[in-house]
Amino acid sequence: MFTNNPFADLTVFLPPRVMQAYIVLMIFAVPIGTMFDAYHKGSAKFFARRRKKAAAAAQRRLSGMETASLATRTIAEAAVSGEFCKWKRRTSHLLMMYGFLLHVITTIVMVFAYSEAARTPIILPALWDIGALMILVGGFWFFFFLRVNVVYDGHSPFHVGRADLFVGSLIGTAAFALIWHLVQTAGNPTASLIFYGVYVFFTTLLFGSVFWSKFAHMFYKPVVAFQRRVEEANGSSDLPNPAHSRTGRS
């Protein structure tokens, strides 16, 4: 199961260019959906006003080196989900984030570089499956045990809403990727095509629903975090000092 390229076998039914065109469309769907989301919610306009206000209230101008340092720290924080204080939520998000990146990157490589190749490096399909497994572990952990409405509001763990669209479609994509790969390896062409269709459905839902889901938040959070760091550094922040800072001075 972990040694064959699942997309190479599809070339019997689908030309590689069709799969490649689909991936390109899904990639473009993310920024387009994010821009529509920012426009619809007024996030871009609000953020622009916020930056203008902060620039006017700044007590000092940051150098290019300082700005680069703040950007680096923001990226480092995002890379380890530093916005989450509790290790359970952080671990869940890290599993989903890096599992998603691993799954997507290996998908792109196998479809664009090895869809017609006689032999795909074994490491690629193995990493593809591992990425899907990481998504499932982190996703199910979050979905059934860490969601706010489940933990604090007493809802059934099976209760879903619009806020769960991103995690739900992500879990569906990973789950049916593994099922499709397993069925394909078992040598059942009909069942393989059926599960491939379901996999494509959840993948399309994941990337095509950016406007309605929380997918766009992955881009908002680092931007907001960076702006907050800039405001704290140039003295324009209107937020109260953190509690630990006050404690340190007392």
Image (spheres, helix red, strand yellow):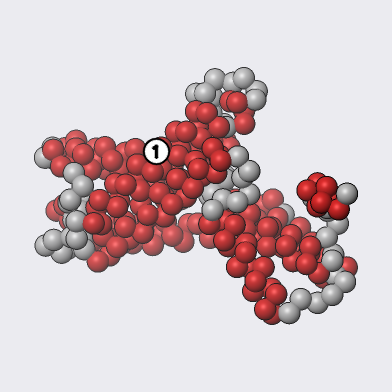
Q: Callout 1: 10 Å neighbours few (<14), some, many (20+)?
A: many
Look at the image and tell me in which quarter the N terminus lies.
top left
Rendering quarter of residue 226: bottom right
Q: Which residue is mark 1?
A: 136
Name the residue: 33% across, 60% down.
108
Q: Position of residue 244 (x, y in %)?
A: 78, 48
Helix, strand or loop at mark 1? helix
Query: Can you say whether 148 is above or below 101 in the image?
Result: above
Q: How many marks?
A: 1
Relative horizontal placement of residue 37, taking residue 108 as reference (left or right): right
Name the residue: 54% across, 53% down.
80
Q: Position of residue 151 (x, y in %)?
A: 60, 26
Query: Can you say whether 116 is above or below 97 in the image?
Result: below
Query: Can you say whether 125 is above or below 187 in the image?
Result: below
Is residue 56 something one can see in this rendering?
Answer: no
Q: Position of residue 119 (x, y in %)?
A: 13, 61
Name the residue: 41% across, 37% down.
137
Choose between 208 and 86: the one closer to the eye: 86
